[in-house]
Each structure stands twice: as C-alpha cells, then as structure tokens.
Amino acid sequence: MGIFDFIKGNKKAKSERTEKPSPEQKLFSEKATEIIIPTFEQFGFKKHRIEIGKYSSIMIYRKENQYLKISSTTYPTDYPYCYNIIFGDGDSEDVFEYDWNSVALWRFKREIEQNSTASEYKFPTKNGVEPSLKNANTELQKYGLTFLNGEMDLFYKIRKEQNQNREPYKIHSPDENGKYQTLFEPKSVEQKKKYS
C-alpha cells in the first residue's frame, strides 16, 4: 500500500494535506509508513496529521497527550538535508508549544550513550532510504522506549536541559526614532520558563 492509499484509508485524522510531492519526499514518506509507522502503532499512537510536500514531509501520530513526529526537509536553504523523529508532549499544532515541548530522538541517544555524536538523520538518497529508516526505527525502539511506553521522566529531563541552553525568540523592530531594538518575544519567554 502506498502512502496515498494509506492517507485515504483513515478519515478520522485531523488534517491530511498533500501538495505535489517531490519523488524524494514521496519515496521517503512511503518507506517511513512501511518501516517506522508500525512501531508508532504498536505502542498505541494513532494517525493525527500527514503532510507531504515538494520539499518536506510531516507525519504526526498521537496517544493522548503524547505525540511522535517524523519530519523531513529538502528545502534548498536547509542543506544538508535531514529528517528527525521527534517526541512531544501537548499540542502538536501550536508552534510555541511544539518548539519548546518536544525532543528529537538523537537527544535521547546522546543522553543514554554519553559519548554519542548523534544528530539529525541525513536525508537518504534513493538507494539509502530503506536502510536509513530501518536504522532510525531500531534506534527509536532502543533509545525511545521509555517515551513509547508512556514513561515521561527521561523526556522531561532532556527537554529541561535542551531549553535551559536556548534563548527565547528575539524581535527586532524600530522604535519611534527609527533605531532598531531587540526584545524577547513574550510567549517564548513564558515557554522557556515553563519548560526549562
């Protein structure tokens, strides 16, 4: 079953928007559906939203307040191209919420294997899609097992460490004299306090 048949099969998902996907994003999403999504479902996560576009794809699965997201980018300005498996808590649709209240799988790997240099997964070329996603799925089950089982302590620990090292978003705007001032965006200040 292709990703597009899969999307049509579940009318309960909140949003299913697909623009003309690039062959790379289409192949990536189809293989992610075959290789990683069964692991999401095995742990009780259900399809919430899928978007496949020319330069990116997002697949979000939810279980109560938790969510898992596969996110990829091949935007020309995002080179080197990559993808992530992301663990989140709360609202997966609000940018302020998911940006401050989510953690990538590679951070779990670094926490568990102290000497690891893990980072985003390199977006795979045609022949490397299946091996890359199989490796990501193995790492999901190895390093993300606590989250998959609904145990949130490690997630909260990593999230706190991640957010303590971040600054709130900055807004650059001119004052009444035309001089630019830099201020912290209030909502992100609030989120930093909440999740650090």
Image (cartoon, rainbow, N blue to C red):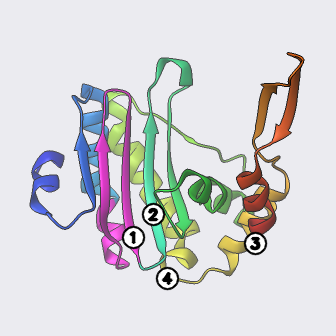
> Which label's residue is closer to the chain start, 3 or 1?
1
Q: Which residue is mark 3?
A: 157
Crowdedness near tag 2: few (<14), some (14–19) or many (≥20) residues, C-alpha within 10 Å? many
Residue 128 x/y as whole percent: 37, 34
Q: CA distance from mark 3 to mark 2?
A: 18 Å
The residue under the point 84% across, 58% down is: 164
> Which label's residue is closer to the chain start, 4 or 2?
2
* Highlighted magenta segment, given as a residue range: 37-63
The residue under the point 31% across, 39% down is: 28
Residues tagged 3 and 2 counted as in contact (Cβ below 8 A): no
Q: Amino acid at mark 1?
A: Arg
Judge whether 5 appears above or below 76 on screen: below
The residue under the point 27% across, 55% down is: 15
> Which label's residue is closer to the chain start, 1 or 4?
1
Crowdedness near tag 4: few (<14), some (14–19) or many (≥20) residues, C-alpha within 10 Å? few
Residue 71 x/y as whole percent: 45, 46
User: On residue 62, which mark appears?
Assistant: 1
Residue 81 x/y as whole percent: 50, 28
